[in-house]
């Protein structure tokens, strides 16, 4: 189907004829603000492996259960089986999402997978998923760590907005358990495995005449290159793995927790304020808040800063830990399944992580 046919199809509301291409500098000066109305999240899905790893299960490795809870809020996380890879988790989340949206896999015409734990360096995990789904669509991975789903969401929205896709599937899928060192008691307990998905479609104006169009009312993406704070040093072209580097754990995730924590609190506050100011929305008007599930203290700091009632925030870090790019779509699907997302709700999404990179947007559901 040609882009012009997509825009005028009887089965979908016609897309606006004017696509704004300009952006403005954000209030914080950290990035630029964009808008992408006329897009709806038509469905969500998720999948987590069956194996549950509790804090008590980690005591034998030297981890302190009380420290984990007090510092992070994490009680347990999921671990993929030996036969599961990122594409397997992504496939299960994708099937769940398509069922929720009542869309067949063959009708997916864009597939984006956000992951830092791909099945292979090449080909992309998205291409493996495309084969499993049996759709004919461009498919590619995005590596933006814990901000990956947000970058994928905004990227997919541009395809839909300009008429190049009408069923854009965005997935965050991670097998973080294979990137962390069991001897690193400060990092090992933090991460878990899982996948989440969202399907984007074009839509018309909001059914409420007092509201603007549905979609991404405002968004900001950005990066402050500081690879030393959170990285996997070995395994790339900069530092190919050798027997010596493997023996000292260069293939595992390394994190300066204090630096990342301080940066995360600051960037959440700044980027959330940017999208709210750009949309003319007060913090108290936000109905649902979904932040990257990295640490309960970061979530609490954000809620306190904006004086948003805590019950409006979706929290699952206690059950799943930090699932990197899967974190936000997992929480989004949870909120959807629990009936917390109602038509017309203002939903705030914010991801932040290695890069250091971030992505924040305000969506009208």
Image: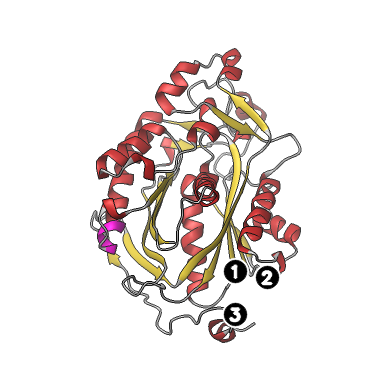
Q: Which residue is mark 3?
A: 11
Which of these two is toward me, 269 or 331? 331
Magenta region: 275-279
Q: Badge 3: how crowded within 10 Å, few (<14), some, or many (20+)?
A: few
Residue 162 in sight = yes
Q: CA distance from mark 3 to mark 1?
A: 12 Å
- Looking at the rendered structure, the number of numbered marks drawn on it comes to 3
Q: CA distance from mark 2 to mark 3?
A: 13 Å
Tell whether label 1 touches label 3 (CB within 8 Å): no
Direction from residue 136 to residue 202 in the image, left or right: left
Say above or below: 148 vs 301: below
Q: Which residue is mark 1?
A: 167
Residue 329: where, in percent of width, then height? 53, 50
Q: Which residue is mark 2?
A: 107
- Give the number of the disc on residue 145: none
Which of these two is toward me, 185 or 280? 280
Q: Residue at x 53, y 22 (%)?
A: 184
Answer with mark 2 or mark 3, whichever residue precedes in sequence. Answer: 3
| Quadrant the N terminus occupies | bottom right
Q: Nearer the viewer, mark 2 or mark 3?
A: 3
């Amino acid at each position: 189907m040609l882009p012009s046919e997509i825009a005028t199809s009887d089965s979908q509301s016609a897309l606006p004829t004017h696509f704004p291409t300009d952006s403005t500098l954000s209030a914080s000066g950290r990035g630029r603000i964009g808008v992408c109305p006329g897009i709806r999240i038509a469905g969500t899905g998720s999948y987590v492996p069956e194996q549950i790893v509790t804090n008590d299960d980690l005591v034998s490795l030297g981890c302190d259960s009380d420290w984990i809870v007090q510092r992070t809020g994490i009680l347990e996380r999921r671990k993929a089986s030996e036969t599961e890879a990122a594409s397997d988790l992504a496939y299960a989340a994708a099937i769940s999402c398509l069922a929720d949206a009542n869309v067949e896999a063959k009708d997916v015409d864009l597939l984006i997978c956000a992951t830092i734990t791909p099945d292979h360096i090449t080909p992309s995990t998205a291409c493996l998923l495309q084969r499993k789904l049996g759709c004919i669509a461009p498919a590619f991975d995005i590596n933006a760590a814990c901000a990956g789903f947000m970058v994928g969401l905004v990227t997919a929205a541009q395809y839909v907005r300009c008429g190049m896709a009408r069923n854009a599937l965005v997935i965050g899928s991670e097998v973080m358990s294979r990137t962390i060192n069991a001897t690193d008691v400060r990092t090992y307990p933090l991460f878990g495995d899982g996948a989440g998905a969202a399907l984007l479609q074009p839509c018309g104006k909001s059914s409420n005449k007092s509201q603007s169009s549905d979609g991404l009312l405002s968004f900001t993406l950005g990066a402050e290159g500081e690879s030393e704070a959170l990285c996997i040093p070995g395994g790339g072209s900069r530092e190919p793995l050798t027997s010596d580097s493997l023996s000292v754990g260069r293939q595992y995730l390394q994190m300066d927790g204090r630096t990342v924590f301080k940066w995360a609190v600051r960037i959440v506050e700044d980027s959330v304020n940017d999208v709210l100011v750009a949309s003319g929305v007060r913090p108290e008007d936000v109905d649902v808040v979904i932040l990257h599930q990295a640490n309960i203290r970061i979530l609490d700091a954000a809620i306190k800063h904006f004086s948003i009632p805590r019950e409006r925030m979706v929290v699952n870090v206690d059950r799943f830990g930090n699932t990197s790019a899967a974190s936000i779509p997992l929480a989004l699907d949870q909120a959807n399944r629990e009936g917390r997302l109602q038509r017309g709700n203002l939903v705030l999404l914010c991801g932040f992580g290695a890069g250091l990179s971030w992505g924040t947007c305000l969506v009208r559901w």
